[in-house]
Image (tube, rainbow, N blue to C red):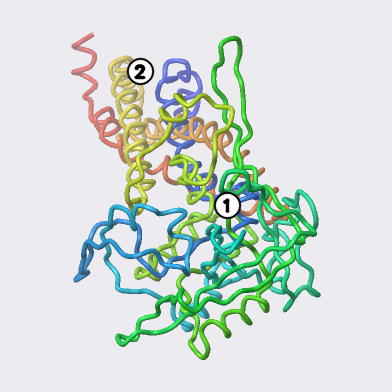
């Protein structure tokens, strides 16, 4: 009876308790966001970046992201020379220009770790990045930098092949393996008056020889170059975002693109060039691209990999791409006024390892909501002293009054939490639908998330409502009537 009475009182006093309801709704919405929406992306998110890079997660052997030292880790400041086997110079140029703090001595990724990464939860494929520096020869004296990357046509997932980005010509087919064919970006940083090679044209690439010095370190020998002629079979363009600014009359926009000189060739073709340039030397795998079919919990996958392999750097392609756009590393503004371009550029500094602040933020928000519930109950005590005294005079026990007060607090928490949950869980369910998750799977995850949200909000509301409830139940009938 007292439980039902508490529920009736909570429903009748919802208008008075609106602040507590809204606060609990906000707390539940934030909690729902952290467990369902902030951990991943829709299926097509950053698709052009994923297609050009070949996957969803980038792995570097070098520890390029600054983080707090842990255990007996040793930190040193260095300014290394540019490595030809990764795209660090594109996405992290600061480590070669300004130097960086390094906590790991890793320079390559071991075959054992590559196999282990392939078995990690959420990882559907592992692709070593095979790159070589090269120059496109315009004449004997005129050339420009064009790094060459291998694309494994056989193993790449359809979503990771930039076929939809082809502007003219075509992407690779299995028959191209071992052939001197290439696909290039239509938008490149080229010398004045030079246009990107088009399908049907040919280019000559100059590769350095690869050797080891007396310290068993790999170096590039440009005194004995290798020249190869390639036929261009395709051009691609990779749109990045739409940039808007206020013009003299109205809002104007410009579609931005990824400008890259990287040349894509089939893996078998690249392997033949490596053997000719390096002989029996084994290629030093310094970067991986991991594929994940389901992006719903991509950031959770990255966080787990960071914890399992602390000697390497892991970053999701969405985060890598966002950072590159914010720092203007890969785009070129053509129509945007120069003053706005300069005002929006972010200083290139060593990136820090993002800390997972979701748990402390969630606790703070829940505590705030719980305190409002407790404050609401204290107000209720002052307003309903006579009612409590009457209930006690007719035989209500302290436990009965406590249950009634806690029920009222619980109802307020559940109503607010349900509103906040629905507000953010619907976009989360739509996110899962875009990643081709089945209806049963989505419903199961929604129920699990609902149980987690309601359990957390109910627990904190009961915990913080217990003291006011006990105080209410402990009031003496005579003291209440005397004060009236």
Q: Residue at x 36, y 31 (%)?
A: 369
Q: Residue at x 40, y 77 (%)?
A: 219
Disc 1: which residue? 260
- Across and down, in percent, residue 234 comes to 75, 57
Q: Residue 179 or 462: which is nearer the viewer?
A: 179
Residues under numbered marks 1 and 2 in contact, where contact means CB atoms less than 8 Å apart: no
Q: Residues within 10 Å of mark 1 (few under 14, many from 20)?
A: many
Name the side, left or right, on which 72 lies relative to 316: left
Which corner quadrant holds the C terminus? top left
Q: Residue furthest bottom?
A: 280
Residue for point 58% across, 40% down: 425
Question: Residue 397 location, x and y as percent?
Answer: 32, 34
Would residue 31 appear left or right of 245 to someone viewing this image?
Answer: left
Q: Is residue 454 visible?
A: no
Give the image location of residue 108, x and y in percent.
41, 76
Q: CA distance from mark 1 to mark 2?
A: 75 Å
Q: Nearer the viewer, residue 363 or 57?
A: 57
Looking at the image, is 224 positioned above or below residue 428? below
Can residue 483 be spotted in the picture? Answer: yes
SS for callout 1: loop
Q: Residue drawn 56% across and 37% down?
A: 424
Q: Earlier in the sequence, mark 1 or mark 2?
A: 1
- What residue did someone put label 2 on? 387
Q: Which of 17 and 176 lies nearest the eye of the viewer? A: 176
């Amino acid at each position: 009876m007292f439980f039902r009475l508490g529920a009736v009182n909570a429903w009748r006093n919802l208008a008075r308790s609106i602040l507590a309801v809204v606060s609990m709704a906000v707390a539940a919405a934030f909690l729902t966001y952290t467990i369902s929406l902030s951990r991943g992306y829709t299926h097509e998110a950053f698709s052009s970046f994923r297609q050009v890079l070949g996957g969803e997660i980038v792995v570097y052997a070098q520890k390029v992201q600054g983080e707090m030292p842990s255990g007996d880790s040793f930190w040193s400041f260095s300014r290394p020379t540019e490595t030809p086997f990764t795209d660090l110079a594109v996405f992290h140029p600061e480590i070669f220009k300004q130097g960086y703090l390094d906590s790991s001595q890793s320079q390559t990724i071991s075959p054992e770790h590559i196999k282990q990464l392939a078995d990690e939860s959420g990882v559907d494929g592992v692709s070593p990045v095979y790159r070589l520096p090269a120059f496109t020869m315009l004449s004997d004296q005129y050339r420009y930098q064009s790094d060459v990357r291998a694309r494994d046509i056989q193993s790449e997932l359809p979503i990771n092949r930039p076929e939809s980005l082809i502007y003219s010509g075509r992407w690779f087919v299995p028959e191209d393996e071992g052939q001197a064919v290439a696909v290039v970006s239509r938008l490149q940083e080229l010398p004045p008056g030079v246009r990107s090679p088009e399908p049907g044209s040919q280019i000559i690439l100059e590769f350095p020889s690869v050797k080891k010095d007396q310290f068993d370190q790999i170096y590039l020998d440009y005194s004995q170059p290798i020249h190869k002629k390639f036929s261009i079979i395709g051009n691609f363009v990779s749109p990045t975002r739409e940039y808007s600014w206020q013009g003299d009359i109205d809002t104007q926009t410009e579609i931005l693109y990824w400008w890259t000189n990287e040349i894509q060739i089939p893996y078998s073709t690249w392997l033949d060039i490596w053997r000719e340039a390096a002989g029996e030397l084994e290629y030093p795998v310094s970067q991986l691209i991991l594929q994940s079919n389901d992006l719903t919990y991509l950031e959770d996958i990255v966080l787990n990999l960071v914890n399992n392999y602390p000697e390497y750097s892991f970053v999701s392609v969405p985060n890598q791409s966002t950072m590159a756009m914010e720092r203007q590393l890969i785009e070129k503004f053509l129509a945007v006024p120069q003053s706005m371009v300069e005002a929006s550029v972010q200083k290139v500094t060593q990136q820090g390892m993002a800390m997972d602040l979701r748990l402390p933020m969630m606790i703070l928000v829940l505590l705030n909501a719980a305190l409002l519930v407790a404050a609401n109950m204290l107000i209720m005590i002052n307003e309903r002293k006579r009612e409590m005294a009457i209930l006690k005079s007719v035989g209500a026990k302290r436990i009965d009054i406590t249950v009634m007060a806690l029920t009222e607090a619980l109802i307020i928490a559940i109503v607010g939490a349900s509103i906040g949950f629905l507000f953010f869980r619907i976009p989360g369910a739509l996110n899962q639908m875009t990643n081709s998750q089945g209806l049963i799977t989505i419903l199961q995850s929604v129920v699990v998330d609902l149980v987690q949200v309601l359990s957390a909000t109910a627990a904190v509301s009961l915990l913080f409502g217990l003291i006011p409830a006990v105080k209410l139940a402990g009031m003496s009938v005579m003291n209440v009537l005397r004060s009236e």
